[in-house]
Amino acid sequence: MKTVDTKSYDCAIGCPVEATLDLIDGKWKAVILYHLLGDTIRFNELGRRLSRISQRMLTRQLRELEAAGLIHREIYPEVPPRVEYSLTPLGRSLELVIRALWGWGHAYLEVRKSAPRPFNGNRPAASAQRAS
């Protein structure tokens, strides 16, 4: 399991960006944090919301976020056990970053929808559309 606490940074100009990206890197961590912005969520509900993630990967990402101090894992002594995840105050402090990522991604996808198709490797997009 990767932790930022054990990594040393050279503290160049981009050092804080590198440290932040180390915490939320990968395909799923920022998405998990986004879903936890709203409320406490159970493990299986997170799995449903992130339908393309495997249970193993979800467990791994949650453990890394917990080790980084960004999320809190609460286990209830019930049968079957109930496990809930929520943001810690440190995790909550990433809210502006996560919402900015969402906003930028939303705008990018909107532009991409209306933009012409990129070069496909064989011929320009305009030629490809005429050939269709």
Image (spheres, grey):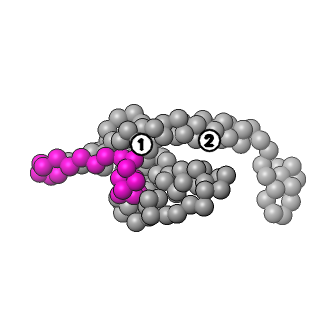
The residue nearer to you, when weighing 69 against 29, is 69
Q: Residue at x 65, y 41 (%)?
A: 109
First to last magenta residue range: 61-81
Q: Is residue 56 above or below residue 82?
A: below
**Label 1 vs 2, first from the N-terminus:** 1
Residue at which label 1 appears? 91
Q: Residue at x 84, y 64 (%)?
A: 122
Type of residue at label 2? Gly
Q: Secondary structure at mark 2?
A: helix
Q: Residue furthest front?
A: 11
| Image position of 34 (left or right of 71) | right
Residue at which label 2 appears? 105
Type of residue at label 1? Gly
x, y (%) of residue 95? Answer: 48, 36
**On the rendered image, what quadrant is the N terminus found in?**
bottom left
Mark 1–mark 2 distance (CA, rounded to whole Å): 20 Å
Q: Secondary structure at mark 1?
A: helix
Whether residue 127 appears in magenta in the rendering, the answer is no
Disc 2: CA contacts within 10 A as few (<14), some (14-19) or many (>=20):
few
Residue 3 — which label?
none
x, y (%) of residue 118? Answer: 79, 52
Q: Is residue 121 above or below residue 30?
A: below
